Image: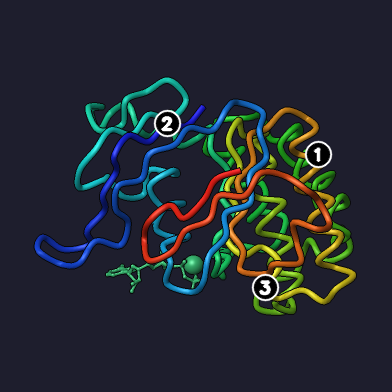
Amino acid sequence: MVRLEDITLRYRPGAAPALSGLDFALEGGSFTWLMGPSGAGKSSLLKLLHLAILPSEGRLNVMGTAIHAAGRKELPALRRRIGVVFQDFRLLPHLDVLENVALPLRIAGRGEQQLLADATELLRWVGLAERMKDRPEALSGGEQQRVALARAVVARPALLLADEPTSNLDAEQSRRMVNLLRQMHRLGSTVIVATHNEALPDEYPAPILRLEGGRLASHG
Ligand SMILES: Nc1ncnc2c1ncn2[C@@H]1O[C@H](COP(=O)(O)OP(=O)(O)OP(=O)(O)O)[C@@H](O)[C@H]1O
Ligand SMILES: [Mg+2]
């Protein structure tokens, strides 16, 4: 599903690498916790995996495509099979909650009726059906985070990446978020969740990929 071979990432030529010498593979259908202190490179690794940036060195393979060698035209179709919950949500402020969640389906060209039904179902799933006509700014941070999850999964992504998805949630909501992520895992998505909350893997034991200073400290 995902394979990195000796991957280095520099944000600017000559700058210190944010990621270096990363070498590992994740199987299709796996669930992985991505851990490490602030600045370790968790978000940077997720940015590589959802193809927002390209590696400076090394070989990256995502869902059977060699990203380091792929043409620009190949990437958009691949990106549509990847769902992302961003650390800062990135909901569109001028669209209501329902339209935010429906957006990936619109981009995929789904029919209006099906798309609204699917988005509504997902909002019910995250417990926000009654807020679907609100703008994101009218929601709390935790509610926005759940909308971001609904949007990330509505198109049934093969690869689901979540960056600190519980950072704005209380203990109860956090447990709920983890349950939603495991449910996606059970439905067949490959899931990678970045967090510096050491308590989360206790709620759902799964392999841990640990970064320190941009390097892989352990995997298992
Ligand atoms: N856009 C950028 N331009 C330059 N340097 C960056 C950029 N984004 C991140 N970095 C640097 O890359 C390193 C890793 O940052 P990253 O955001 O990946 O860490 P993180 O593990 O996600 O941290 P946190 O837990 O605080 O979210 C840091 O040294 C950071 O300053
Ligand atoms: Mg981060």
x and y, in percent, of residue 175 in the image: 85, 62
- Viewer-nearest residue: 206 or 29: 206
Mark closer to the observer (3, 1): 3
Q: Residues within 10 Å of mark 2 (few under 14, many from 20)?
A: many
Q: Quadrant of residue 159?
A: top right
Q: Is residue 153 left or right of residue 25?
A: right
Q: Which residue is mark 3?
A: 167
Q: CA distance from mark 3 to mark 2?
A: 28 Å
| Image vertical order of residue 121 relative to residue 98, above or below | above
- Front residue of 111 and 189: 189
Residue found 66% across the figure and 33% down from its top: 30
Q: Earlier in the sequence, mark 2 or mark 1?
A: 2
User: Is 37 on the left or on the right of 130, as rendered?
Assistant: left
| Residue indicated by mark 2 | 3
* Mark 3 or 2, nearer chain start: 2
Q: Position of residue 101 (x, y in %)?
A: 67, 51
Q: Amino acid at mark 1?
A: Ala
The residue lying at 85 percent from left, 68 percent from top is 173
Q: Which residue is mark 1?
A: 117
SS type, badge 3: loop
